[in-house]
Amino acid sequence: MRHAPWHSEHRAARLERKFERFEERIERRRGQRFNGPHALPIAVFLALVQVFGTRAAAYGSTAEALDQAGYLLLVAGPAALLFRRKLPLFALAGALAATVAYFAHPYPNGPGFLAAIVAVFGALSAGFRWLTWLAVTAAYTVYVILALPRTSTQHLVVVGVWCLIIAVFGEAARVRGMRYSQMARDRAHQEALARAEEEKARKEQQRRQASDERLLIARELHDVIGHHLSLINVQAGVGLHLMDEQPEQARVALSAIKHASAEALRETRAVLAGLNPGEAAPRTPAPGLHDLERLAGEARGAGLPVTLDTVGTPRTLPPQLDRAAYRIVQEALTNVRRHAGPEATATVIVAYAPRELTLTVTDDGTAAPAGEDGNGIAGMRHRAATFGGSVEAGPREDGGFEVRATIPLSEEETT
């Protein structure tokens, strides 16, 4: 089964492949600080330095004058460096051979060894340690054999020491290059881990948001369906009871059932419209505290006398808070119809304070109220807690049940 791009295992596999490719590039380019794209200019520069430096050193020297072969050897070493990017060992062999051949002849001393030094550093940095040491040793041995008849032992020792120093400095450069490469890999690894953590946090945040949205939709559907089905159930019972004796009253009950079912369908469509952004927005606004009179009328039509009272100056609230307040009152009245008994009455008080909104729904019923673990009360508490509020629900001392929701209002919501 093919995993989605955001799947954790798929993401880990992608990161692992990226690390492997990065390490392969590092290994291929390890220490190739001299193997950049400007090989030709560097080779020309070294050739000029070796040729003109040697000519300058030749003034006043008793050595054999430079001839065509000498110039060719001075240029051959830098020319071999043109291949050091793809063939570092070939460049090393060419530069060392040209250098040994030049200094084995009685040509003037000078900077004719620079190309060999660059080639040694490049081969060591490319990772060819033992082959480089072997090539340097072989070149020095050939030089000793060729130059021994006309060169003092002291000079040969000095040349050997310098070869050793150059090789040691090349090893140091190689180690330093490896250290920088490791640091680069570690940094890339840390950055990749940081990006993975950020991606994980973002996915987790999206998951939580989706979960919160699903919970909100579930609570909306619970309130809408529970309220309207309760009305339909009551009106259906009234209609069945009055169908034979008072058919006109039964007609009123059926009309109330039709209205309640239409409202249930409308509000359900409005809630589910959020699941599909491609659907048209609901034509009617979301319910709020301005619809409490209609809600109370529906409850009265279902046989529950409801008294609606407002304390303080009503004000416009944010849509989300306004809808949550309406759903709290709606659920409280639904619980009254279900649990307070047929003779109960309800009172709804909406109190606007400077920094607080209080919703109080009480009834004088005698039946057992809804349990504390019911979904209705838990849903009301969740809605209030979303805005930093709380809900207290419990039996009253003089009988009945009371639900009190307190929601704080911010400065922007009170202006």
Image (cartoon, rainbow, N blue to C red):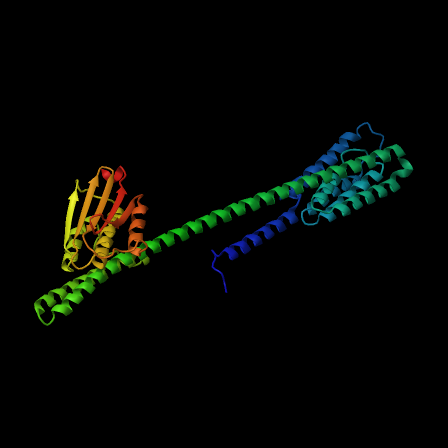
Q: Residue 195 at x, y = what percent?
A: 50, 47
Instruction: Between residue 206 and residue 15, name the one nearer to us.
Output: 206
Instruction: Between residue 227 and residue 404, name the one nearer to us.
Output: 404
Query: Eyeballing the image, is 54 above or below 390?
Result: above
Instruction: Between residue 48 and residue 27, name the one nearer to us.
Output: 27
| Among the 4 quarters of the image, the one containing residue 63 | top right
Residue lying at the far front in this picture: please name it. 398
- The total of numbered circles placed on residues is 0
Tell me if 85 is positioned left or right of 288 in this view: right
Tell me if 107 is positioned left or right of 274 in this view: right
Residue lying at the far bottom in this picture: please name it. 244
Q: Residue 307 at x, y = what percent?
A: 14, 50
The residue sitting at 82% across, 43% down in the picture is: 137
| Among the 4 quarters of the image, the one containing residue 115 | top right
Q: Quadrant of the C terminus?
A: top left
User: Taking the image as drawn, is residue 283 in sight?
Assistant: no
Q: Residue 332 at x, y = what percent?
A: 23, 53
Instruction: Between residue 384 and residue 23, name the one nearer to us.
Output: 384
User: Taking the image as drawn, is residue 212 in sight?
Assistant: yes
Tell me if 300 is positioned left or right of 200 in this view: left
Q: Residue 268 at x, y = what percent?
A: 26, 60
Query: Eyeballing the image, is 345 above or below 148?
Result: below
The residue sitting at 15% across, 66% down in the picture is: 238
Tell me if 346 is positioned left or right of 66 in this view: left
Residue lying at the far top in this picture: please name it. 60
